[in-house]
Amino acid sequence: MILSSWRIDNVWNANCFQVVWFVTNVDSVDASIVYGALTDQEPDNVIKNKLLNQKSQFLSSAIGVSCDQKNSVEVKPGRVDWFIEPQLEENDPPYSKSLKVHSCLEGIRKKILELDDVIIGEATRLAIVTVLISPMRSIDEATNALVKMCKIPFSSGNLMDLSLQFNRIKQVDNEVVINRLTQFSVETSVLSQVMMNMQSGQTNSIRMDERFAIRAQLDINTMPTGQIFSFERQQLLFQALLDETVLLANEPTRLF
């Protein structure tokens, strides 16, 4: 089917992007302000919590939708996360919408370079996480494709819940080493509709749409060393992380 070329924007589409700042202090970091700086828009919904609990693990969050793209910023103790995802409606089938890899990564690069130095502050670690999806027609096709792509010396017929992880470190300079973590798995997603019998009160779950895919997660991050990165240092390191992300997105198996 598509095994001859594993290239982005041809086989792979993006299911999610995540940019992470592990920060020294979030007392003055506001999710709505970070959201505005990263998207040039006001968020549709803002939530702030003074106390954390099991239901609310963030201090503040901001969410908004523009052109079928959902952006969200979450501020938690010790970290700030920016998520970019396709906006799915309630009845949209799984993987029915996706994002273009190259254009989104370049958009992330542009917004990070434009970011003001006082918005987030100093950071101890940085990360770029990209989730790629390659749709398949069945669980067997997805497993076979992943076995062939990753050159696994086993029969796909004997493999269940296949998941693989690889990490290759890279020295950026004399002080910074980055992890290039790639994770591969077979995904099954089901969209179902719940029907209720009003007389009996019983509910029945009716399967609507089952979809399959290969999932590749690229987690490019700086290793924890206790260093504190200034704003200028963050800008340079993010460029290195994005460069590695682009290379791996073009060929997710290049580190094998």
Image (tube, helix red, strand yellow):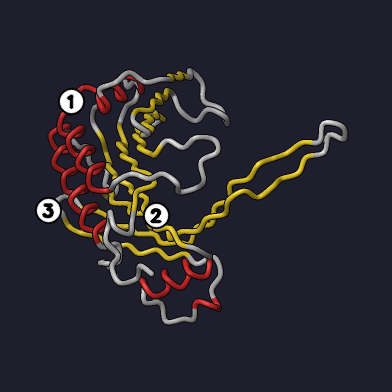
Which label is found at residue 161?
none
Q: Which residue is mark 2?
A: 133
Q: Quadrant of residue 202?
A: top right
| Image location (x, y in percent) of residue 36 | 28, 21
Amino acid carrying label 3: it is Asn
Mark 1 vs mark 3: give the one in front. 1
Whole-Å distance between the Cαs marked 2 and 1? 34 Å
Which label is found at residue 174?
3
Question: What residue do we see at 41% from left, 62% from top?
Answer: 184
Helix, strand or loop status at disc 2 = strand
Res. 166 in view: yes
Q: Return the disc, 2 or 1, that comes first in the chain's sequence.
A: 1
Query: Which of the two residues, 200 or 231, is positioned nearer the viewer here?
Result: 200
Q: Return the disc, 1 or 3, that comes first in the chain's sequence.
A: 1
Mark 3 packing: few (<14 Cα in 10 Å), some, or many (20+)?
Answer: few
Query: Which of the two residues, 156 or 200, is positioned nearer the viewer here?
Result: 200
Whole-Å distance between the Cαs marked 3 and 2? 35 Å
Question: What residue do we see at 25% from left, 67% from top?
Answer: 254
